[in-house]
Amino acid sequence: MTPSPARRELGAFIRAKREAMPPVETAGRRRTPGLRREEAASRCGLSATLYTWLEQGRDISLTARTLALLADGLDLTLAERAYLFELGQRHDPESPPPPPIPAPVPEIVLKSLSAIQTPAYLLDSSFTARGWNQPAISLFTPWHESREPNLLRFVFLIPAARTFICDWEQSARRLVAEFRAETGHTQNNPNQLHLLDQLRQESREFLALWNARDVQAKKGGERSFQHPEKGVLRYTQLNFLYEGQERHRLIMLHTSAQPGN
């Protein structure tokens, strides 16, 4: 019986993860990279026969427990674990529930954006943009066009951010320190926790900065951007906190002296 495409992919996937794991130190040369099948099976708490059948893509009965043992034994990331369960067509009992829908932004706060002449946008407690005025859309063209509303995800996961934001490394470090300070005000916020899980899995740079545990209040200051059409633009950023059902920050940028002026 010919294995299904999903089972063939599952087998190829776990084989690739096995071969990428550090080999067990043994005397003599090893002919295969990473772990042997028997070693991987032992780590997963599965029989060598069952593990071999899985790598071969056989259409054998699969349970959520078997997939969980594979995920744990092969040290899969959250994204890799989710992919494994999708291929196995089973529900992961440990998958976290989706984060709740953020509370609606008060209308008066959104209206304030259009009344501001300089670039201005609104961030919620997870640093997701909840509103922009037209000058902000024009300034933050790479961010807006990326269709990634979260500032942290844009900075760490969208390549265009590294060109757009001058002094990217310094800005990224400051942003993570500001976000850690924000999480102290809203502990156990499910949206923040969900975002943290994603970023720690998807960005090694974010993980390193987060583990540094720097904390910094969001004070604003000088900001510089390499606009794709207008060149280097310099601003002074101001932040205003709105305390309602959820914390929101109104970010305003006032033009600073431009190069050559």
Image: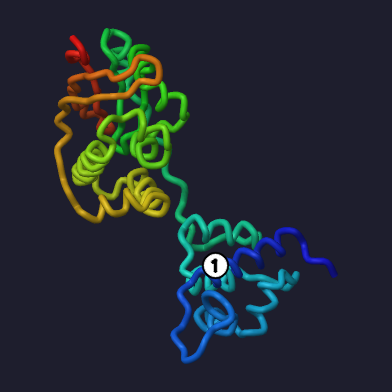
Q: Residue at x 17, y 25 (%)?
A: 222
Foreground of the two, 246 or 163: 163
- Say which quarter of the image contains residue 156: top left
- Above or below, 94 against 259 in this view is below
Foreground of the two, 106 or 142: 142
The spot of residue 76 in percent (x, y) is 48, 64
Q: Which color scheme did the rendering employ for the protein?
A: rainbow
The spot of residue 28 in percent (x, y) is 50, 90
For this view, does 38 lie left or right of residue 138?
Answer: right
User: Which residue of the protein is positioned furthest toward the right in this rendering?
Assistant: 1
Q: SS of the residue at dot 1? A: helix
- Above or below, 148 against 186 in this view is above
- Above or below, 225 against 179 in this view is above
The spot of residue 116 in percent (x, y) is 26, 10
Q: Amino acid at mark 1?
A: Lys
- Say which quarter of the image contains residue 249: top left
Q: Residues within 10 Å of mark 1 (few under 14, many from 20)?
A: some
Q: Residue at x 55, y 71 (%)?
A: 19
For this view, does 59 lie left or right of residue 209?
Answer: right
Q: Residue at x 21, y 39 (%)?
A: 174
Residue assigned mark 1? 17
- Say which quarter of the image contains residue 229: top left
Q: Quadrant of the C terminus?
A: top left
The spot of residue 51 in percent (x, y) is 63, 78
Q: Quadrant of the N terminus?
A: bottom right
- Above or below, 165 against 177 in this view is above
User: Which residue of the protein is positioned furthest toward the bottom in this rendering?
Assistant: 27
Q: How many marks?
A: 1
Q: Residue at x 23, y 43 (%)?
A: 173
